[in-house]
Image (tube, rainbow, N blue to C red):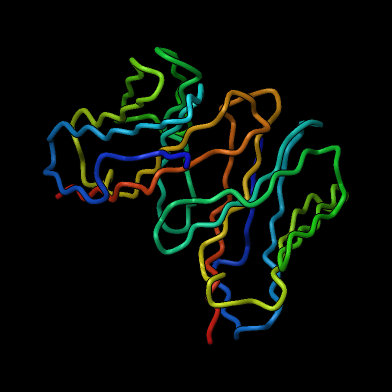
Amino acid sequence: AQKVTQAQTEISVVEKEDVTLDCVYETRDTTYYLFWYKQPPSGELVFLIRRNSFDEQNEISGRYSWNFQKSTSSFNFTITASQVVDSAVYFCALNRYSSASKIIFGSGTRLSIRP
Amino acid sequence: DVKVTQSSRYLVKRTGEKVFLECVQDMDHENMFWYRQDPGLGLRLIYFSYDVKMKEKGDIPEGYSVSREKKERFSLILESASTNQTSMYLCASRFRQVLNEQFFGPGTRLTVL
């Protein structure tokens, strides 16, 4: 069975602090894809990043970075020097390569950045 | 600018009514999805469509049906709305392969009284 766990329901930090959002997944598949999406207050989910199961390189995009570790089945997301515009709900998702429809989303982490 | 649009942002219906939620994408994507989003539960897949006239049940299809007669349009139908179907409904589309990201609409917040 597949499962995605985002244990942090809500996080609140002061602007300019660094913050890490955790994502732990379960799957028996060897080939799969992991995603992060951002849902701002407007409601529309926006794609942030994709990782396939064979690519464990960490990625950095501006203030955002992602740490993928197969050994711990984790795909964590760090925001450096957070800004108020980072306030949103963030979702981690897992898609099996073998099934186009089998996409599992975590329950989301609501991030609030206080000025 | 690529877009997924949903027919309504807010909808209020009465128990027992037939409800249609419409989703249109302009990216010529093969795959389309309907999710519902509830607090603490994340997004749960209701139905998936591979392509025109092709559909597959998701994790929570009970009480819902779908229609995909044209590639750009994917409709979600609540045959007889019930109060437990009060939720946020999100539509998404994706270019055919699993590795591709989904593009989401703004959502429809449905309240069933």
- Please say if A50 is above or below B80: below
- Please say if A113 is above or below B24: below
Q: Position of residue A59 (x, y in %)?
A: 80, 55
Quick one: A86 or A2, which is closer to the camera?
A86
Q: Residue at x 35, y 30 (%)?
A: B62
Q: Residue at x 40, y 52 (%)?
A: B38
Instruction: Quadrant for residue A54, please give it.
Output: top right
Drawn side of residue A98 relative to residue B105, left or right: right
- Please say if B64 is above or below A113: above
Q: Position of residue A47 (x, y in %)?
A: 59, 48
Quick one: A28 or B8, which is closer to the camera?
B8
Q: Position of residue A20 (x, y in %)?
A: 71, 69
Q: Position of residue B113 (x, y in %)?
A: 14, 50
Q: Residue at x 40, y 12 (%)?
A: B53
Q: Residue furthest top?
A: B53
Callout count: 0
Quick one: B19 or A50, which is closer to the camera?
A50
Quick one: A15 or B64, which is closer to the camera?
A15
Drawn side of residue B103 relative to residue A3, left or right: left
Instruction: Quadrant for residue B80, please give it.
Output: top left
Drawn side of residue B48 relative to residue A3, left or right: left
Drawn side of residue A104 relative to residue B77, left or right: right
Viewport quadrant of the N terminus of chain A: top right
Q: Residue at x 24, y 32 (%)?
A: B78
